[in-house]
Image: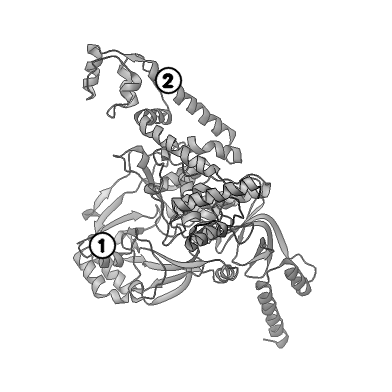
Amino acid sequence: MPDQVRHDLKVTRDRRAELLTAFTIDFIREQAFGFLGEQQLTDNYDIIVVGGGHAGCEAALACSRMGCQTLLFNINLDSIALMSCNPAIGGQAKSQLVKEIDALGGEMGKIADKTALHFRLLNASKGPAVHSSRMQCDKQQYRLAMKAVVEKQQNLHIRQGMVERLVIEGKEIKGVLDQTGFFYAAKKVIITTGTFLNGLVHIGTSQTASGRAGELASITLAACLKDLGFETGRMKTGTPPRLKASTIDFSCLQRQDSDHEPQPFSFTTVRLRPERLPSYFSATSSETHRLIRENIQHSPLYSGTIKGIGARYCPSLEDKVMRFRERESHPVVLEHEGLETEEIYAKGLGNSLPLELQQKIVNSVKGLEQAEIMRPAYAIEYDFVQPTQLKPTLETKLCCGLYLAGQINGTSGYEEAAAQGLWAGINAVQALRGAPPFILDRSEAYMAVLIDDLVTRGVDEPYRMFTSRAEYRLILREDNATIRLMGKGYELGLIDRAHYLDLQDKMSRIERGIAHLKATPVKPLPEINEALTKINSPALTSHTTLYALLKRHEIAYDDLACFPGWEPEADPFVKKQMEIEIKYEGYIKRQFEATKKLKDQEKMKIPPAFDYSTVPGLSNELQGKLTRIAPATIGQMERIPGMTEGAISAVLIMMKKRELSGC
């Protein structure tokens, strides 16, 4: 290589290093124009989204649909919306998030409906508060369908590249620098990096710096966040092996087919695709457990190599075997990853053991004696930012205009990530418009429970949504998400007028239908009691109404067809809402009454600069928590772990004193 060329390359590398350590726009311009001449150094956007996973896609789509010029960065454009673990959407408590995302104009539910191959309604035998839909999707079709939506979205620009620096002036975000030193200016930046911050993949003693298997980790951006003063930690997750379908003996396994009449996630979906693929059930054996116990020293989880915190509710196979020694077996579920692939997702076999041991473990499971591993299982460690450093809008407290969403906030799951991405995207746009922030309370949405838990309580393990986390789950059902939230989506400009008016019509029909049932009498006549007997319902002894009959758990709306005065209703949504509102009237009424207290507490705002050190009687521990979290309301303060009634009273008294003194 000629000396002059070698010298020029060295100058280029040195100048790039200078740019990547720059924190001010003036410095960047001065250095770059001296090196590059008068050519343009920057692109300008309203909002930049860093990361094209489930959080990033929802954030970018919301911002662009609300009229902002938005730039979406992803390290590899072929992995936009990639399902890196189980290609499933929904499940217990997660389906409520998907429905809420859809009701607010998000995309996840629509793409799941387009690409789903297996459908189940979980908890179908229980009450509607815990009904949860789950769809197993075609992994590659999901990715391609979401990528197509993102690519075609007006106001949304896409770049393949790695963001390495945040550019900040006076604690305000100004843009980002990519790996080439190119500067992109923006008024707001949303970071949705998933497991890519300092990602480290473990397979036995092998360690690879990866955001997920086969993809680059984001090292410099992780260091940048630490340099800015963010409190970070390490978490761990993992994924099971993918097996070759033609090497599995499905004939000896229990088969599970899809529900016959599955319901879509999205209110916009007219019909679901006809293709279906079954799932299969197996279980680990005594040989599986022997292999793991005798070789546990080879697990990086048990050798001490892995430092990150994993989720208690989703342990790896070696963790289950070692922690639950009394169990003779653990379930294994085999699910297809797509129509055009042989890959089978082996749920329940997730581990971080060496590959040769993984193969023996797989072959020790019934039906998998000859199964071949196409992709090995692995564990991955990554950095997260403690979410108590965020405002309820998901904007960081350290830097104005910088938002974090998804696994970077210590959560797990596609649905939790997508909900945060949508929330952050909406709030970034609202801030640009000078409009009020988009903040829901815990009685309005599961996603509000998610956000409030994160910013108020923080995380000490990967956070996953459960129905038990939602105090008002009877009124936060998946079936009424559109009723609860579509109006807000319409106000934000994310729901079109036709869909909004259609919902208004449905709600009017629900109201009229309930009123009609209340007003329609039923007499205890022989023919009436005969009809009740046929549907296994007790006979009448006195006058009643169709409304009262529908309260009986064994009677559905259409069962009333044989009674005088009944009016048919063709819309399944309208019928279902009438049934639920009538059958659970007392419970729903009590939950609505309970929400009044919450709303009163949320109305009691705490001044942003409130000095907790001036409150008499507060312990140093509580002072530290309150100062760090800076709750916006008394309601949020009450939910901080360790908070006492005495501390709340002391703060209220001090707030009242300041109000009276005019401070």
Q: How far apart are marks 1 and 2 (CA)?
A: 58 Å
Q: Which amino acid does label 2 sit on?
A: Ala
Residue 172 found in image quarter? bottom right
Residue 28 place in picture, x, y as percent = 72, 69
Q: Can residue 290 be seen in this view?
A: yes
Q: Can residue 639 be seen in this view?
A: no
The image shows residue 416, relative to residue 160, as above or below, that is above
Q: Mark 1 packing: few (<14 Cα in 10 Å), some, or many (20+)?
A: many
User: Mark 2 and mark 1 in contact (Cβ < 8 Å)?
Assistant: no
SS at mark 2?
helix
Residue 368: image tag: 1
Residue 589 found in image quarter? top left
Q: Mark 2 packing: few (<14 Cα in 10 Å), some, or many (20+)?
A: few
Residue 92 place in picture, x, y as percent = 37, 48
- Nearest to the observer: residue 548 or residue 343: 548
On the rendered image, what quadrant is the N terminus found in? bottom right
Residue 12 found in image quarter? bottom right
